[in-house]
Image (cartoon, rainbow, N blue to C red):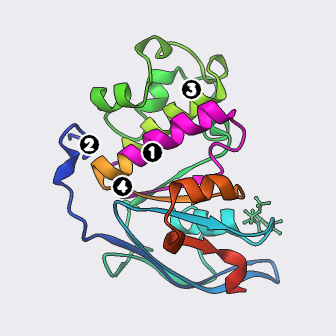
């Protein structure tokens, strides 16, 4: 099946919405956050910030279906996605190596989630000659491009970008975010950027789309 991120991805409508409704997170007996609610639209970049340990990654993982919330629910187009097999959100790690099999070549890695669109690979700057390399044979910025390409193979509606450029130099950081902003615009993808970096946040998201998790506690 053709990924919705083909060259013609402008077909996607704007109506889809991801919602966290009264979501809580608990580890053991410790409440990390309680009753967090967010409404997120396609074609928009959102930022989640807040002090270290307030639960940004946990919230991102809950939105992506990697953690279950202790309370509340995640909805997509007003329907609970807790029992849906295909979760409409993909999660990008700060260190892409964390989520890659070190024994797989890049070609196998990018095809893991679904078919790869050649035009999209070109747009993301993922080069054909990387296909036979292993993850440790790419730079941090190159790995992040591969990771984005792989996540799009699953045709997600939203991406959670958890500090994805925090370990990169400013040039690589700017390039990756330029690509993600272009994807947001052209493919109407929704992005939730988790970041401590105020200057990055002000460049990628409108002030109204900036959510501080500490404000909720
Ligand atoms: N699997 C886990 N088991 C127990 N506690 C956890 C687990 N994962 C995270 N925590 C704790 O939950 C709290 C929130 O962690 P989380 O990683 O979501 O915060 P964060 O805001 O993303 O932090 P940072 O900005 O430092 O990355 C922290 O105190 C952390 O130690």
Residues at marks 3 and 4, CA–CA distance in whole angstroms: 21 Å
Q: Where does residue 193 sit, x and y in percent of width and height? A: 56, 57
Mark 3 or mark 1, which is nearer the start of the sequence?
A: 3
- Mark 2 sits on what residue? 3
- Sequence-first tag of 2 and 1: 2
- Can residue 59 be found in the magenta stretch? no
**Label 4 secondary element:** loop
* Residue 81 seen anywhere in this rendered image of the structure: yes
- Whole-angstrom CA distance, mark 4 to mark 2, is 13 Å
User: Residue 62 location, x and y as percent?
Assistant: 57, 68
User: What whole-number distance in Å separates the C-alpha atoms at marks 2 and 1?
Assistant: 17 Å
**Mark 3 or mark 2, which has the lower sequence index?**
2
The percent coordinates of residue 94 (x first, y second) are 66, 45
Q: Which residues are magenta?
A: 154-182
Mark linked to residue 180: 1
Residue assigned mark 4? 189
Question: In which quadrant of the rendered view does residue 87 lie?
Answer: bottom left
Residue 155 part of the magenta-drawn span: yes
Per the model, the C-alpha gap separating discs 4 and 1 is: 9 Å
Q: Which mark is residue 142?
A: 3
Disc 1 to disc 3, C-alpha distance? 14 Å
């Amino acid at each position: 099946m053709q990924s919705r991120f083909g060259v013609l991805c402008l077909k996607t409508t704007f109506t889809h919405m991801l919602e966290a409704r009264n979501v809580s997170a608990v580890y053991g007996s410790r409440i990390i956050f309680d009753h967090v609610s967010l409404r997120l639209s396609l074609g928009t970049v959102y930022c989640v910030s807040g002090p270290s340990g307030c639960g940004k990654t946990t919230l991102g993982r809950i939105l992506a279906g990697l953690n279950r919330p202790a309370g509340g629910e995640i909805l997509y187009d007003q329907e609970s996605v807790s029992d849906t097999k295909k979760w409409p959100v993909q999660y990008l790690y700060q260190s892409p190596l964390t989520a890659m099999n070190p024994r797989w070549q890049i070609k196998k890695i990018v095809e893991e989630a679904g078919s790869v669109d050649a035009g999209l690979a070109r747009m993301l700057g993922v080069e054909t000659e990387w296909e036979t390399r292993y993850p440790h044979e790419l730079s941090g910025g190159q790995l992040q491009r591969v990771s984005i390409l792989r996540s799009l193979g699953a045709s997600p509606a939203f991406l959670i970008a958890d500090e994805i450029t925090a370990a990169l130099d400013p040039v690589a950081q700017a390039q990756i975010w330029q690509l993600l902003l272009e994807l947001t615009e052209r493919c109407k993808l929704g992005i939730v950027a988790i970041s401590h970096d105020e200057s990055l946040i002000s460049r990628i998201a409108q002030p109204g789309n900036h959510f501080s998790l500490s404000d909720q506690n």
